[in-house]
Structures are given as C-alpha cells and as structure tokens.
Image (tube, helix red, strand yellow):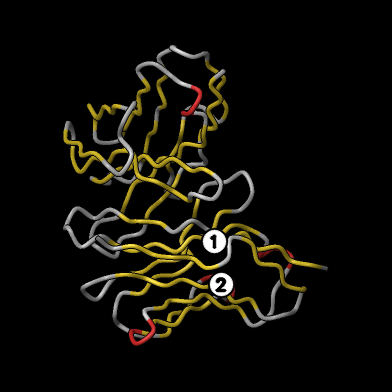
Amino acid sequence: DVKVTQSSRYLVKRTGEKVFLECVQDMDHENMFWYRQDPGLGLRLIYFSYDVKMKEKGDIPEGYSVSREKKERFSLILESASTNQTSMYLCASRAPGRTGELFFGEGSRLTVL
Amino acid sequence: AQSVTQLGSHVSVSEGALVLLRCNYSSSVPPYLFWYVQYPNQGLQLLLKYTSAATLVKGINGFEAEFKKSETSFHLTKPSAHMSDAAEYFCAVESNFGNEKLTFGTGTRLTIIP
C-alpha cells in the first residue's frame, strides 16, 4: 500500500521559532509537493521538488523554505514562524506523467502562538 | 495560467438524493482535470480524473464526472447520496507548464442530511 507519512499531526510553536515539517514517501516518486490548506482558500502550493536537491517555488513561498536531500524525504522549513502561518500543511508525492495521481499525507496542523 | 472555480463552498443534500458539485475550469489548451475527496482528519484521495480518453469519467464510491468543453465544466455527480459521502471535495487542474503541478479549487463541503 502506497504511503506518504508526515512526521507530526499536530504542532504548537511560538512566534519566531524555527519549525521543521517532515514528509517521507515510499513510492520512489520524483515529484513531491507541500501545500497549505486554509478554510475558504482550498489548497495553495508552497513549494515543489522534481528531483533530489531540485526545488521550485509555488504560489505562496514567502516565509518558507524546503529541503530534499534524499528522494524519499521532502522537508518544509519555517525559518521564523509567525501567527499567519497557523494552518494545515499537506505533503504529497505524485505518480509520473501529467495524469499521475497525487498521494497525500494526513496533514500537519500547525498552531503558532 | 490554468485555474478552476468551484461554485458553492457548502452543499447539503438529503440521504438518497442526487449529489451535484460544480467545477468550471479556465484553460487555453485541453486540460487534465481531477476530483479529490478529503474525509475528516485525513489527507486527500483521488476520486476520478479526466485524461481526454472519454468525456464521462467514473470514479470510486459511485461518483462520476462529465467533461463539457462547450461549458468549460467538469461537474461531479452521484445519483444517490450516502451518509459516508460527507466530506470536502476539491476540483483540480493540471498545469500546462510541464512541471506536473496541480492547481486546486477552494473546495466544497458536502453535508448529508439523514
């Protein structure tokens, strides 16, 4: 069974803290994604990666960075968390091709106080 | 850029009634379109996808969607709603920039009335 695993389901951090969100997939997919989900706004793409050490900005990259040192792992980093980054974060990996399915993790709900 | 618009952020239907969730796309080229479902406290999973092979696409759990180029629509339907269909539904379009990213709509929350 295919799997995308996000390391933390719930996190509470303070303003200014550095936050790491980890995501691991076991399907050997090249493409991985980080989305942010907010009520009424749907899913918005933060960053994606199409290969190890390769990354591209999505629609809302400000305040975030990413790391992909190994094919199976894609990390989202908040260098200095702010209250407006309180949100649900969803990681996904994608099967090859333009019609490939996205496989999602269960999400990481981050609260920044 | 490709985009999708989901009309209605909340839809309520009675158990056994028809489910209709609307999605319109904006695209200068024939798009690839997807419907995903998110059950409470879970990630998203694929319901169905349009890949130009057939305009009527059947998915899991009895859902289907019809691609209508003249209306730029890809509405999701199910003939008879079940309580287990209560979830949030997202329409998505494949980008035509060759980097294989999807752009999602704002979602429609479906409530089933017993």
In the picture shown, does residue A11 fall above or below B80?
above
Q: Residue at x 49, y 76 (%)?
A: B75
Residue at which label 1 appears: B89
Q: Is residue B31 above or below residue A83?
A: below
Picture residue at 33% right of the left edge, 42% below the top? A33
Q: Residue A98 appears in which quarter of the rendering?
A: bottom left
Residue at image position (46%, 28%) is A85
Give the spatial CA distance, label 1 vs label 2. 8 Å
Q: Quadrant of the C terminus of chain B?
A: bottom right
Chain bearing mark 2: B
Q: Earlier in the sequence, mark 1 or mark 2?
A: 2
Q: Which residue is mark 2?
A: B21
Q: Amino acid at mark 2?
A: Leu
Q: Secondary structure at mark 1?
A: strand
* Dot label at residue A97: none
Q: Position of residue A100 (x, y in %)?
A: 30, 60
Q: Nearer the viewer, residue B47 or A45?
A: A45
